[in-house]
Image (cartoon, rainbow, N blue to C red):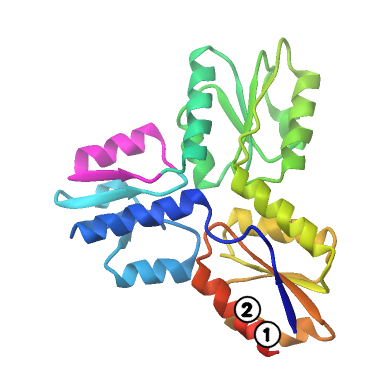
Amino acid sequence: MKVLLADERGFCFGVERAVDMVEDALENKETVRTLGPLIHNNEEMGRLSSSGVTTIAEPVQIERGETAVIRAHGVTPEVQGDLEERASKVVDATCPFVTRVQRLASRAAAEGRHVIVVGNPEHPEMVGVKGYAPEHSFVINDSSELADLPKLKNPLVVSQTTIKAKTFFDTADAVKEIAEGETEVINTICSATRDRQDSARALSGEVDAFIVIGGKHSSNSRKLVAVCKEKCDKSFLIQTADDINPDDLEGVETVGVTAGASTPNWLIDDVVRKLESL
């Protein structure tokens, strides 16, 4: 089987930065505890766990003498303050792209403006962003939810860093139609997400099937599958090479491969070797 790799794939800048920060802390012999899984990849988390990294669910579980790590998704200001009070050290591994959304939301709220954030309200990144403008922000999946919001005046429209561009721009256009005053639209989808989606979309028209490697709960990985399905019906999300179903690839001569932003290179290599052996 011929395997074609998307030009842009695997660890994004923010994830690679977060992993590097944790590994630096380990090298300093610190007791490292991350607030929630550092990244959405069970296999990479297993590797870090074997090096001594443990995960906590809430700040109350951190103790003096330990290093608390804020993952790439970020947290609310209240949660960060709680960690700083309890831990001996806090490593803020929030992705700079996410930090930008937090600052924009905070600025607009300080100006008394509404903030419309296009994204999944339950996603950790969105929970953190909303904490920077709790009384002024609304997180919505798409334009269909605008009818449930109060009257908007001079709103700011930003987005979760990993959503599809079309969803963001369609929603922003809908906000402009109903809002009073001037609507400020700032595209905060991270470049890594756009690059991966564009690369996968270009390759998907050249292959018989497409494999996306990523965590089942990874937003950006699921979005990659949706992008691939636009041109390639046989597009599948897998976590490891063991998830490849040969029956799904029956009659396939050429398969494309990409990977979500939390997928390490060693997992991609495993999948490629498995596919080439079919």
- In which quadrant is the N terminus drawn? bottom right
CB within 8 Å, label 2 to label 1 = yes
Graded by Cα atoms within 10 Å as few (under 14), some (14 to 19) or many (20 or more), the crowding at tag 2 reads: some
SS assignment at label 1: helix
User: How far is disc 2 from disc 1 in space, using C-alphas?
Assistant: 6 Å
| Residue bearing mark 1 | 276
Vertical placement of 2 versus 231: above or below? below
Residue type (three-letter) at the residue carrying disc 2: Val
Which is nearer the eye, 124 or 60?
A: 124
**Bounds of the magenta segment:** 74-93
Q: Look at the image and tell me whether residue 133 can be seen.
A: no
| Residue 82 included in the magenta stretch of the image | yes
Amino acid type, label 1: Glu
Q: Residue at x 23, y 51 (%)?
A: 67
Badge number at residue 272: 2
Check disc 1: other Cα within 10 Å, few if <14, some if 14-19, many if 20+. Answer: few
- How far across and how far down the image is residue 211, in percent? 70, 71
Res. 135 mark: none
How far from the left and from the top, in percent, is residue 74? 43, 42
Give the left or right position of residue 81, taking residue 232 as reference: left
24 sits left or right of 125 in the view? left
